[in-house]
Image (cartoon, rainbow, N blue to C red):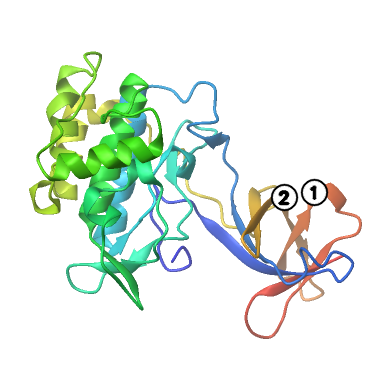
Amino acid sequence: MLGRLRSPRLIRMYDTLVVDDPGHPELDGATVLVLEQARGSIDAVPDPGDPGSVLAQICEGLAQLHRAGWVHGDLKPANVLLMRDGSVRLADFGLAAEMEGAHAYVPVFVTPDYTPPELLWAEVDERGARVRPSADVWAFGVLAHVLLTGAFPLPGGTPEARSDAALRHARGAQKLRLSPGLPDAWREIVRDCLAPAHAGRLGTEALLARVEAAVGVARVPRPSGPRSRPALAGAVATALLTVSGLGVAADVTHRSAMTGEGTPEHRPVLVASASRSYVSPLPDGPRRLRR
């Protein structure tokens, strides 16, 4: 998906590599995604900044994604990255799905606290569970309440208890527990994101307009300058390795060199062992990262 979309609020993918390292079978054959380098996710950075500004940028990213015909499917704090210039990117599109008409299909894998009630009891076929953009809107409502108040909008001391509360909410047997500390400008936004049925939730464009009105678009930082292409010297990104469900992170520095014909040549190199790692281009498909 990232190879097809170029949106300023979505993390940028520079390259795709394959690890070729028989000496480390747990990594050999792993796919490496070379991404922009971020400070960290908003739940890991000590001071992510003004929550209203962060939420406006998240909403802008969702709108860009939905306009392109995709559903994120796993919006949560760990999948929102804060860049060094203070701007925000959506990341981790492992569950993202392309729309087919009014819905898409996603695997039966959810983060309970950010999953709408209709997906907690969803019917599943060989293609997965049907999901709509309104699922991302629900997740945004939960995320907004958490960022603005530090608490979840449904009662319960565990994710399972809060999921049960979400199901009761969908049946009309449980009310939302909006915090008294939730700013007035956000109270109705969160409530409308968390409508019990998907049809009652805000559309993404309407949500973006209301969020921008709540925070003032002038307060939302824009990415600083053009986003560097990977062939530029000094560009830095993060490579994410996924091996049989195991996530491993490694930093990569993008270096440019000149070929014999004077053409710039891009070479991602593992920083931790740059003297022993290199990338050789293959005729087709991802390049292989060797040790």
Q: Is mark 1 on a helix, strand or loop?
A: helix
| Residue 213 at x, y percent in the picture | 16, 30
Q: Is mark 2 on a helix, strand or loop?
A: strand
Residue under the image location 23 percent in, 49 percent down = 117
Q: Nearer the viewer, residue 161 or 128?
A: 161
| Residue 48 at x, y percent in the picture | 47, 26
Checking the image for residue 244, the label placed there is none
Residue 194 in view, yes or no: no
The residue at which mark 2 appears reads as 250
Q: Nearer the viewer, residue 37 or 260?
A: 37
Q: Say which quadrant the N terminus sits in.
A: bottom left
Q: How far apart are marks 1 and 2 (CA)?
A: 8 Å
The residue at which mark 1 appears reads as 271
Residue under the image location 60 percent in, 44 percent down = 37
| Badge nearest the viewer, 1 or 2 | 2
Up-down: is 230 above or below 282? above
Residue under the image location 50 percent in, 32 percent down = 85
- In this rendering, would 169 be left or right of 249? left
Q: Which of marks 1 and 2 is nearer the N terminus?
A: 2
Up-down: is 130 above or below 117? below
- In this rendering, would 244 be left or right of 1? right
Name which quarter of the figure residue 154 lies in: top left
Disc 1 to disc 2: CB gap under 8 Å = yes
Q: Say which quadrant the C terminus sits in.
A: bottom right
Q: What residue type is labelled 1?
A: Val
